[in-house]
Image (cartoon, rainbow, N blue to C red):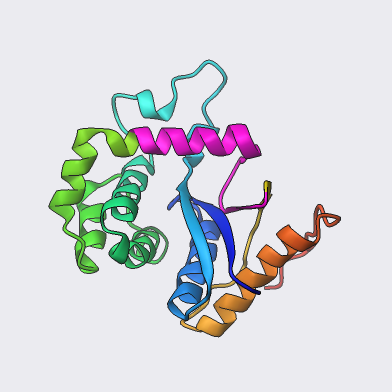
């Protein structure tokens, strides 16, 4: 696949987002010529009933929101460390089984990959990461009817994708997995749904 620009949503709570984003990071680290825009998306917000209080207006942060805010800060303020922090935050939740609502868990994941956690939390205190999360989430919903993660968006189209595997350090495999998905999205609009009836065990 030649260089393509595409967007992918994430929420650290989702194991399928973890799989997809590990493939994305492994592929990029392997030199894939992708222009990827990483967009935060709150799964907790999708469960708010009509008329309910949005997660960004709650006095106490909803599950997953703190980690999303941290991811936004690293993406925008420490872009050279974003991939590592991204994988670390997914790992804290899904490999280590930790609670990303705990500031110390988020802090530990960031510091483990060389991100200055104090600076990240100072930015979160300023409020702009939560506003960025809200704006990007709402834009994804209004423009592309996004309902979950990971959703791939390219050329005005969006697809929700579930990868069942992780790259396990294989950059070439990761590139092939992502490129196949983006090729289907961009080059095969006739394919609307393709889902296995059974999951191999």
Question: Magenta stretch?
Answer: 131-155
Q: Residue 112 is drawn in which quadrant?
A: bottom left
Residue at the image point whose x is 53% and y is 73% from the top: 33
The residue positioned 48% from the left and 61% from the top of the image is 18
Q: Residue furthest top?
A: 51
Which image quarter holds the N terminus?
Answer: bottom right
Judged from this view, the residue extending furthest toward the right is 190
* x then y, percent, for residue 96: 35, 64
77 left or right of 33 in image: left
Residue 62 in view here? no
Q: Position of residue 148 (x, y in %)?
A: 58, 45
Q: Is residue 35 left or right of residue 92?
A: right
Q: Is residue 180 visible?
A: yes
User: Which x, y percent locates residue 83?
Assistant: 37, 65
Give how far across and how far down residue 50 sits, in percent: 57, 19
Query: What residue is drawn where x is 52% and y is 57%?
Result: 17
Determine if the magenta segment contains residue 162: no
Q: Is residue 39 left or right of residue 130?
A: right
- Image check: 79 left or right of 163? left
Quadrant of the image containing the C terminus: bottom right
Residue lying furthest front: 3
| Relative depth, front residue between 47 and 133 | 133
132 up-or-down from 176: above or below: above
């Amino acid at each position: 696949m030649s260089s393509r620009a595409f967007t992918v949503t994430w929420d650290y709570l989702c194991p399928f987002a973890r799989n997809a984003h590990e493939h994305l990071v492994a592929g990029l680290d392997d030199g894939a010529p992708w222009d990827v825009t990483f967009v935060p998306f709150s799964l907790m917000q999708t469960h708010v009933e009509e008329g309910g209080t949005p997660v960004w207006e709650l006095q106490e942060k909803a599950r997953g929101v703190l980690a999303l805010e941290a991811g936004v800060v690293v993406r925008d303020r420490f872009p050279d460390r974003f991939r590592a922090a991204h994988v670390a935050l997914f790992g804290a939740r899904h490999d280590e089984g930790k609670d990303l609502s705990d500031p110390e868990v988020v802090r530990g994941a960031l510091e483990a990959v060389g991100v200055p956690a104090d600076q990240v939390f100072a930015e979160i205190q300023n409020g702009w990461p939560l506003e960025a999360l809200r704006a990007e989430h709402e834009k994804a919903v209004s423009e592309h009817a996004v309902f979950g993660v990971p959703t791939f968006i390219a050329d005005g189209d969006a697809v929700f994708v579930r990868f069942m595997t992780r790259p396990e350090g294989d950059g070439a495999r990761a590139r092939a997995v992502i490129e196949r998905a983006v090729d289907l999205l961009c080059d095969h609009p006739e394919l609307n749904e393709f889902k296995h009836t059974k999951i191999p065990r």
